[in-house]
Image (cartoon, helix red, strand yellow):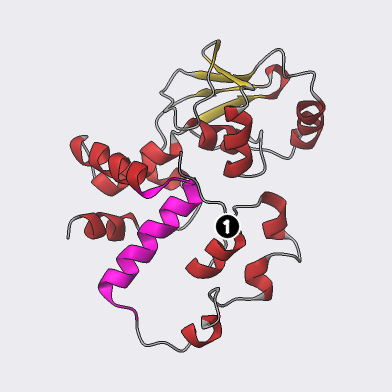
Amino acid sequence: MARYTDAVCKLCRREGQKLFLKGDRCLGPKCAIDNRSYPPGIHGKKATFRRKQSDFGMQLREKQKARRVYGVMEKQFRRYFQEASRRKGLTGVVLLSILESRLDNVVYRLGFADSRAQARQLVRHGHFDVNGRKTDIPSYLVSPGDVISVRSSSRSKTYFKDRTQIMQGNVSAPAWLNLNLAEMSGSVVSEPSREDVEIPLNEQLIVEYYSR
């Protein structure tokens, strides 16, 4: 299975904004984009003085930004776009709703992980149930009414004990999710809306990129 293995801080620098790929590190003094706010590479500093970006360049950068935020490779991202184009509604908005509905993103948005990458690893290691059944597929798409919970065999682990303490009073789930910290679970109240996407994205540019 293809996956990105290089330093993720380079991705934030390439897009010119924080994508919050490393959790708390992105909020601290070690954040790479705060220390080096220019693109990576030997010509990074010169890129600051480049001429105005083309329409294609802006469309590409927005598509890449969305991919990197949700940790999705190109082939899978294209499939999500094709699925969004078949559904009712604005294609760009539906695409973001699909991405938000990924299980790894839901685990992250509920507060059980500091980043989507960490949430993806927790899911792959089989720490979560969906509707009472073990689910270790990060790309699993949840639906309204689904209940996502930490498995009973995982609740005694040090990570989840510490996580519960951290989450006390510090985590607020988005409106489309309902967190039950006492049960270490969360439920999907409704489909995510456009307003629920926390990273600034211009989905219309993504639609234009794939509509060329």
Q: Tell me which segment is drawn in magenta.
A: 53-74
Q: Is residue 171 above or below residue 189?
A: below
Residue 137 at x, y percent in the picture:
49, 27
Q: Is residue 28 above or below residue 57?
A: above
Q: Is residue 136 above or below residue 28?
A: above
Q: Is residue 62 left or right of residue 41?
A: left
Q: Quadrant of residue 120?
A: top right
Q: Residue at x 57, y 62 (%)?
A: 18
Reading the image, the residue beneath label 1 is 6
Residue 99 at x, y percent in the picture:
41, 40
Callout 1 amino acid = Asp
Q: Residue at x 53, y 11 (%)?
A: 133
Pick whichever, 146 or 123, lies toward us: 123
Q: Report helix, strand or loop for mark 1.
A: loop
Q: Residue at x 48, y 46 (%)?
A: 70
70 in the magenta segment: yes
Whether residue 33 can be seen here? yes
Residue 85 at x, y percent in the picture:
21, 41
Q: Quadrant of the C terminus?
A: bottom left
Pick whichever, 76 or 33, lies toward us: 76
